[in-house]
Image: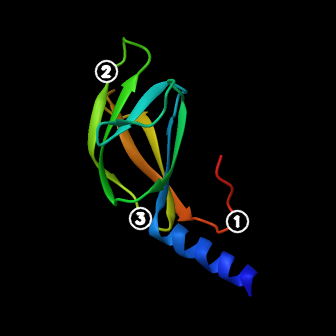
């Protein structure tokens, strides 16, 4: 009985939050901000965020390389119970953009680093 309670509470908690992964297509290192809050302490090419409680955020990408133009995205959306993936890439104009790449259900057995 206790085991089922733990499993169902984990599923319920996972359904109330979302995870997000943002990575750069060419491996550029960046600092990622959600609603002005820094998400990674050191610039990285891949950033994972767990336990997001909102559904829409304002995102900002600050590149470690000063020659690359930092940018913001006002349409960073996540869905509760899902892990969403976004990719930082160049558009046809050569400007960096944040694009939705996919999403999957958060598994109750998923480990959190």
Number of numbered discs overlaid on the protein picture: 3
Q: CA distance from mark 2 to mark 3?
A: 29 Å
Residue 85, x across and y down, in percent: 49, 51
Residue picked out by circle 3: 79
Residue picked out by circle 1: 109
Task: Say which of marks 3 and 1 sits in front.
Answer: 1
* In the rendered image, the vertical position of residue 11 relative to residue 33, given as above or below: below
* In the rendered image, the vertical position of residue 84 relative to residue 65, given as above or below: below
Task: Tell me if residue 46 can be seen.
Answer: yes
Task: Say which of marks 2 and 3 sits in front.
Answer: 3
Residue picked out by circle 2: 69
Residue 10, x across and y down, in percent: 61, 71
Q: Give the residue drawn at x 65%, y 69%.
A: 108
* In the rendered image, the vertical position of residue 98 relative to residue 55, given as above or below: above
Q: Give the residue drawn at x 47%, y 60%.
A: 18
Residue reaching furthest to the top = 67
Q: Badge 2, how many Cα within 10 Å: few under 14, some, many 20+?
A: few
Residue 93, x across and y down, in percent: 29, 30
Query: Of callouts 2 and 1, which one flags the residue occurring earlier in the amino acid sequence?
Result: 2
Examine the image and state in which quarter residue 52 appears: bottom left
């Amino acid at each position: 009985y206790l085991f089922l309670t733990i499993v169902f509470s984990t599923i319920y908690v996972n359904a109330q939050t979302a995870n997000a992964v943002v990575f750069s297509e060419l491996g550029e290192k960046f600092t990622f901000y959600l609603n002005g809050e820094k998400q990674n302490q050191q610039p990285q090419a891949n950033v994972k965020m767990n336990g997001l409680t909102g559904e829409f955020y304002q995102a900002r990408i600050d590149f470690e390389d000063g020659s690359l133009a930092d940018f913001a995205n006002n349409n960073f959306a996540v869905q509760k119970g899902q892990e969403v993936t976004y990719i930082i890439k160049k558009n046809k104009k050569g400007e960096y953009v944040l694009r939705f790449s996919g999403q999957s259900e958060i598994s109750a057995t998923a480990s959190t680093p």
